[in-house]
Image (tube, rainbow, N blue to C red):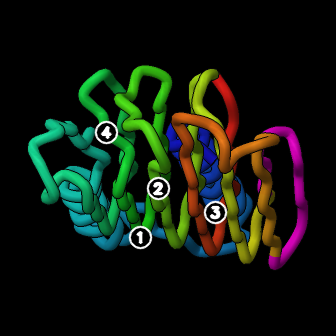
Amino acid sequence: MNRRNFWRGFWGLFLMVVGILWVLNNFDVIDFDFGDALALFFPLLLIAIGLLMLLRPRPHTYGGEGAADKHIFRAFGDVKLSGENLDPNGLEVSTGFGDVELDLSKARFADGENVLYARTAFGDVEVKVPEGVAVSASGGSAFGDIKILGKMEKGIGNQLSASDPNFETQTRRLRVNASTAFGDIVISRN
């Protein structure tokens, strides 16, 4: 679920609850004091806004400067990487709560085997691989769907592996290891 749909659903539900409370109060079904509710919920609203400001997703800029850029962790928020300076070999991307999106269509692949890891606890993993790079990928999801190079597993406790034909004999190869507890995994060609 993307953030836009989440907030649309949240505000829709919030307005429905306020409307129902108002109607029930007008018909004396319940005794609801909007002043007391405002006194209670206004501080909670301020806390929520503060948390959103602190935890909102910030794009991670990949500089390709060295080993420090190869291990990316974000507790809250999405990690989206793409671009010509991206070297996927040895890349490890992890999030606690957020999506991992890797667009490798313009990445620099070394000859031989390139290995990357993409993990999240609560979120989706999406890896886009260009033509001309052989792929061998495996994914695991406790609660979610997995789609790798056209093969698909749905349901609970899924594991899926797929490889291009003659993977081991190709010049440029990418081995992808992806996992999520609650979310989907998609590894596909551009």
Q: Residue at left 47%, top 31%?
A: 104
Q: Which mark is residue 115?
A: 2
* Whether residue 81 is situated above or below residue 66 in the rendered picture: above
State yes or no: discs 2 and 3 in contact (Cβ < 8 Å). no
* First in sequence: mark 4 vs mark 3: 3
Pointer 1 residue: 96
Say whether residue 75 is left or right of residue 144.
Answer: left
> How far apart are the alpha carbons under marks 2 and 4?
10 Å
Disc nearest the viewer among 3 and 1: 1
* First in sequence: mark 3 vs mark 1: 3
Q: Position of residue 29 (x, y in %)?
A: 74, 71
What's the residue type where badge 1 is placed?
Gly
Q: Can residue 36 be found in the magenta stretch?
A: no
| Secondary structure found at label 1 | strand
Say whether residue 183 is left or right of residue 53.
Answer: right
What's the residue type where badge 4 is placed?
Asp
Q: Residue at left 57%, top 55%?
A: 176
Disc nearest the viewer among 2 and 3: 2
Q: Position of residue 131 (x, y in %)?
A: 63, 22
Q: Nearer the viewer, residue 23 or 77?
A: 77
Q: Is residue 15 visible?
A: no
* First in sequence: mark 1 vs mark 4: 4
State yes or no: discs 3 and 1 in contact (Cβ < 8 Å). no
Disc nearest the viewer among 2 and 1: 2
What's the residue type where badge 2 is placed?
Val
Quadrant in the picture for residue 107: top left
Q: Position of residue 170 (x, y in %)?
A: 63, 37
Q: Nearer the viewer, residue 105 or 124?
A: 105
Quadrant in the picture for residue 43: bottom left
